[in-house]
Image (cartoon, rainbow, N blue to C red):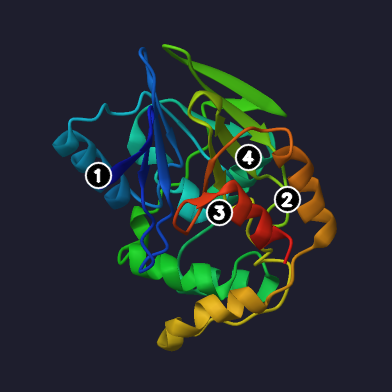
Amino acid sequence: MFQKIAEHTYLRLCEFYTDRPNIGLICGSRRTLLFEAGNSAAHVHQMRQELAAAGLPQPDLAAVSHWHWDHTFGMSALHIPTIAGRETNRMLQTVQSWSWDDEAMAQRLKTGEDILFCDEMIRREYPDRSQIHVQTADIVFEGQLHIDLGGGVVCELLHVGGPHASDSVICYVPSDRVLFLGDANGKDLYGQPWHFDIAHEEELVPTLAALPYDRDLVEQLIRVLDTLEFDICVGGHAEPMSRQALYQSLLL
């Protein structure tokens, strides 16, 4: 369910079982923005049902933080204009060409185009992988994009890169002092070796905690964060945290 975290901002918390990420909803007087598109049509359908049950507006626009499947594969089911950074859209164009049979998925694990964790989660979310439909964005931007939702509510989409993925975009809501990070504060799961065993999922959190950060990329991200005034920040797959807690996690 969506919970209110600031005057105009709502959050639907992540779900671990199929790696569904946190979803933001920012409501202005004229339109509503969804930050993150979800990982499947089923995810989108569930979100829309929950919004209707809560009496919250359905989104008019959706923006995604980066190309990874859990943040983007719901785009085709939203049926509203979607927004992505230019680098994210280029990656989505590549993923559109992917096949989803066992052989093709196994080959991408060998080449490093995909990782075992995502492979396993996709199989869980999509018992029928013919239902995977990858869509590119309707609106593509470079650098930053400001979206006026009305009533003084503006969302600032900022390409920050950072340690997780070079295409990472964050969503800043100045009026609410809220920052949606996507996975921008996460670690690089594609560029360094690590192992995931679906039979021992309890080991995932300590395994990820042990992976190192690229300090240069963390510093790049922090330089952007230093320019923003926020009290609440929301990562892709964790509970909301304070600004202080975010900095502490990045500076470990």
| Callout 1 amino acid | His
- Image point (58%, 53%), residue name: 183
Depth order, front residue of 123/30? 30
Q: Which numbered mark, 1 or 2, is in the foreground of this view? A: 2
Q: Label 3 sits on what residue type?
A: His
Mark 2 neighbour density, 10 Å: few (under 14) some (14–19) many (20 or more)? many
Write down the residue under mark 1: 45
- The part of the image, by quadrant, that contains residue 7 is top left
Per the model, the C-alpha gap separating discs 4 and 3 is: 12 Å
Describe the element under mark 4 as helix, strand or loop. strand
Label 3 CA crowd tier, 10 Å (few <14, some 14–19, many 20+): many
C-alpha gap between disc 3 and disc 2: 15 Å
Q: Does residue 127 sit above or below 106 in this rendering?
A: above
- Whole-angstrom CA distance, mark 1 to mark 2, is 31 Å
Label drawn at residue 162: 2
Of labels 3 and 1, earlier in sequence is 1
The earlier-in-sequence mark between 1 and 4 is: 1
What is the count of numbered marks?
A: 4
Say few, some or many: other residues with alpha carbon within 10 Å of mark 4 (under 14 / 14 to 19 / 20 or more): many
On screen, residue 209 versus residue 234, left or right, reads right
Mark 3 or 2, nearer chain start: 3
Pair 1/4: label in front = 4
Depth check: give the residue in front, 70 or 131. 70
Sequence-first tag of 4 and 2: 2
Furthest residue to the left?
Answer: 53
Q: Position of residue 152 (x, y in %)?
A: 47, 13
Question: Residue 51: in sight, yes or no?
Answer: yes
